[in-house]
Image: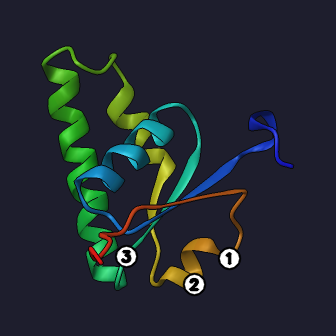
Amino acid sequence: MTSIDTIRTARRCRLGLHGQGIAQVLAMHGYKVALGDVDGETAERAHVRLVEQARGFEARGLFPEGASEVIGGNLAAAGSIEETVATADYIVEAVPEEPT
């Protein structure tokens, strides 16, 4: 079993609002987070959006000073889901579920 103390890299698969928030919080707290979605372009757009959003939160006092720089340094867009999870210590996925 993995202890929270041994986690260094987190992987976030699927980047809707819920997923983006999880990735942003992990990155703000020092985890290296690879962002993965249906393709690399979608992951890159999420990366840009998360850093811009963090700057806005920081400007409004919702995030501490310097948080957007930390988040930007800890997030990276991956080219595929396989690339996203290849070297993960911890994986979080949040996908829509189809009602049965």
Seen in the picture, residue 64 relative to 34 is either above or below; the reply is above
Classify mark 2: helix, strand or loop. helix
Tally of numbered discs: 3
Please give the name of the residue rendered at 42% of the width and 36% of the height, measured from the top-left corner.
Answer: 25
Furthest-front residue in view?
100
> Which secondary structure, mark 1?
loop
Residue under circle 3?
Answer: 37
Asked whether the residues under the numbered discs 2 and 1 touch, taking CB atoms below 8 Å apart as contact, a structural biologist would say: yes
Q: Secondary structure beneath disc 3?
A: loop
Is the residue marked by circle 2 packed among few (<14), some (14-19), or many (20+) residues within 10 Å? Answer: few
Q: Where is residue 69? Give x, y as percent.
A: 38, 36
Mark 3 burial class by Cα count in 10 Å: few <14, some 14-19, many 20+: many
Gap in angstroms between the C-alphas marked 2 and 1: 6 Å
Question: Please, what is the three-letter code of the amino acid marked with disc 1?
Answer: Ala
Residue 79 position by quadrant: bottom left
> Which residue lies under the disc numbered 2?
82
Q: Residue at x 28, y 81 (%)?
A: 41
Residue drawn 15% across the image and 22% down it: 59
Residues under labels 3 and 1: Cα distance?
14 Å
Q: Nearer the viewer, residue 84 or 1?
A: 1
Residue 67 location (% of width, % of height): 37, 28
Q: Earlier in the sequence, mark 3 or mark 2?
A: 3
C-alpha gap between disc 3 and disc 2: 10 Å
- At label 2, which amino acid type do we have? Glu
Q: Residue at x 55, y 73 (%)?
A: 84
Relative to residue 83, is residue 45 depicted above or below? above
Q: Is residue 56 left or right of residue 40?
A: left
Return the residue at label 1. 86
